[in-house]
Image: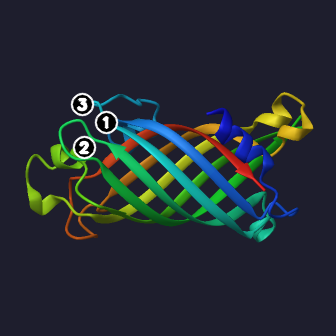
Amino acid sequence: MKYILFLLLTLTLSAQDNYSLRLAYGNASENDLGEIISGQFGSHSQSLSVIALDGGYLLKEGAFEWPMDVYAKAGISYFNESLQSDIYEMTLYVKAYWNFDFADNRIRAGLGEGISYTSDILLAERLEASGDSDNTSNFLNYIDISVDVDFGKLINYKPLHNIYLGYALKHRSGIFGLINNVTKGGSNYNTIYIEKSF
C-alpha cells in the first residue's frame, strides 16, 4: 500500500490537474441501489470482493458555470469470486463531480454513467437472477456514485492536496430490461478509495 501512496504522490504529468487515478477496494451487497443510497449498505452472503483502478481525464472544469467538474473515465476491475473463477471488468463512463468548498476544505459528490463489460457473469448477478441465464449479461449499464474529501486540505498539509479519500458504489444493471433484456441480474459493490488528481 505504501508503494501505491508513493506513486500517487509523485505523479506530476500535468500542472493543471487534468488527470485522475483512483484505487478502490470493496465488497458486494445484496441490497439494491435504492436501499444503498438510503444508507442500507448491507453485505453479501458470499465473500465477494473487488479491486478497481480507474483513470480519468478532465473534460470541463466549472461546467455550466457551476462548481461541477466533468471527467471521461475508464477502469479495470478484478473480482475475487468465492465459488467460481475470478472475473475482470472494463468500464467506460462520464463522471461529474459537484464541489463543496468551505473553511478551506473540499468535499465532492460524484455521479458517473457509462458501460461495463465483464469477462464472465459475476456470482452476485447470477444469484440476483435466481439462475435465469436470460437475466444476465456480460455487457451492462454502469453507474458510479461517490463522495470524498480532499485529505490534504482536511489535515492542512499542502503536499497531500488533491488526494481524495472516499466511498464509491459500483453498480451494474440492465436498467429494468433496457439493456440486453436484463431485468434482474445486476450487482452492487460498496468500495472505499483513494484518488489523486494530477
Evaluate if marks 1 and 3 touch, with contact meaning CB atoms under 8 Å apart.
yes
Evaluate if marks 1 and 2 touch, with contact meaning CB atoms under 8 Å apart.
yes
- At label 2, the amino acid type is Ala
The foreground one among 84 and 125 is 84
**Badge 3 is on which residue?**
46
**Residue found at x 65% / y 41%:** 4
Q: Quarter-wise, where is residue 56 in the image?
A: bottom right
| Distance CA(mark 1)–CA(mark 3) | 6 Å
**Badge 2 is on which residue?**
124
In this rendering, is residue 87 above or below 60? Answer: above
Q: Earlier in the sequence, mark 1 or mark 2?
A: 1
With 189 as the anchor, is 162 left or right in this view? Answer: right
- At label 1, the amino acid type is Leu
**Badge 1 is on which residue?**
48
With 46 as the anchor, is 99 left or right in this view? Answer: right
| Secondary structure under the numbered disc 1 in the rendered image | loop
Q: Residues within 10 Å of mark 3 (few under 14, many from 20)?
A: some
**Residue found at x 53% / y 42%:** 24
Q: Which of marks 3 and 2 is nearer the N terminus?
A: 3
| Percent of width and height locating residue 88 | 35, 55
With 31 as the anchor, is 166 left or right in this view? Answer: right
**Residue found at x 41% / y 42%:** 50
